[in-house]
Image (tube, helix red, strand yellow):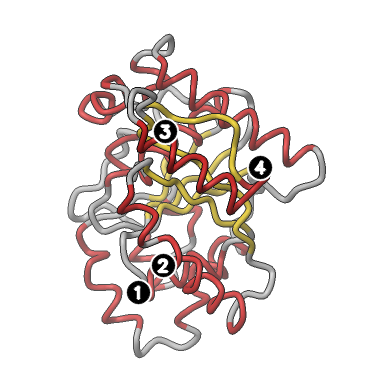
Amino acid sequence: MGKTTTTVNLAVALALHGNRVLVVDLDPQGNASTGLNVPHHAGIPDVYDCLIDNVPLAEIAQAVEGIPNLWCVPATIDLAGAEIELVSVVARESRLSRAITNHPETFDYVFIDCPPSLGLLTVNALVAAQEVLIPIQCEYYALEGLNQLINNINLVKQHLNPTLDVSTILLTMYDRRTRLADAVEQDVRNHFGDKVLEAVIPRNVRVSEAPSYGQSVMTYDPGSRGATSYFEAALEIANRGVMGGTA
């Protein structure tokens, strides 16, 4: 559904406009780290060390080359074992929240790229977050899983993080040539209203190619439709924050 692609490109877009941005890669596959060209091979200090061994985030975060004001906390394959190891850890759901709170520097935006399942890693992200951004692929199957995702978020909100809010919905992989994409867009906008960004991310080959070069589409092909669409989405998010939101 473009989850990691959205994280990387929004983070780069906001950083290029002068915001201080931190990306926390919480997916053991480390795709966000790859997209930002941040080393994340075995032996590199990563978010696992923070969650399990209480290593400060400031010691793990790496500056993203070529993008001022952007840092990334990488994920290595070690993170795959964290789900099991966290089970016996004290205050296991709030380890990431505490680490972010204790970071000595302040950021305008912190993006947490979650794994594709609701385990302890994702719960840590939801406890640490103020807001949830959900990218929705313009396909029928994407809508099927949406209700369950919202239910899970509400459970975390009820029991662990009462300030959590699904604030932003972004439509991705949009193909204007199909009736299905239009129908999905209308369903999502009717259901979520103003939470849905006006900007829509189209299917664009440049967006797919960029990670293989260790880049966001912003730097890989700034003039492409994919890049301009992510810039528009980032601008909307920034404007919402200025107008009184918590983005």
Mark 4 vs mark 1, CA separation in Å: 27 Å
Left or right for 121, reference 229? left
- Give the spatial CA distance, label 2 vs label 3: 24 Å
The answer to which quarter of the image holds residue 158 is bottom right
Residue 22 horizontal side relative to residue 41, left or right:
right
Do we see residue 38 in this rendering?
A: yes
Crowd class of label 1 (few under 14; some 14 to 19; many from 20; radius 10 Å): few
Q: Amino acid at mark 4?
A: Asp
What is the CA distance from the residue labelled 1 to the residue labelled 2? 5 Å
Question: In the image, which is nearer the foreground, mark 3 or mark 4?
Answer: 4
Corner quadrant of residue 196 = top right
* Tag 1–tag 2 contact (CB < 8 Å): yes
Q: Tell me where residue 227 sits by quadrant.
A: top left
Mark 2 or mark 3: which is in front?
A: 2
Q: CA distance from mark 4 to mark 2?
A: 22 Å
Q: Are the residues at dot 4 and dot 1 in contact (C-beta closer than 8 Å)?
A: no
* SS state under label 3: loop
For marks 3 and 4, give the CA distance.
Answer: 16 Å
Mark 4 Cα within 10 Å, few/some/many (few <14, many 20+)?
Answer: some
User: Which one is in front, 74 or 224?
Assistant: 224
Residue to which mark 4 is pinned? 108
Near mark 2 (Cα within 10 A), the count class, few <14, some 14-19 or many ≥20, is many
Would you place residue 7 above or below residue 160 in this image? above
Disc 1 target residue: 119
**Which residue appears at 30% of the width and 33% of the height?**
37
Given the image, on which type of amino acid does mark 1 rest?
Gly
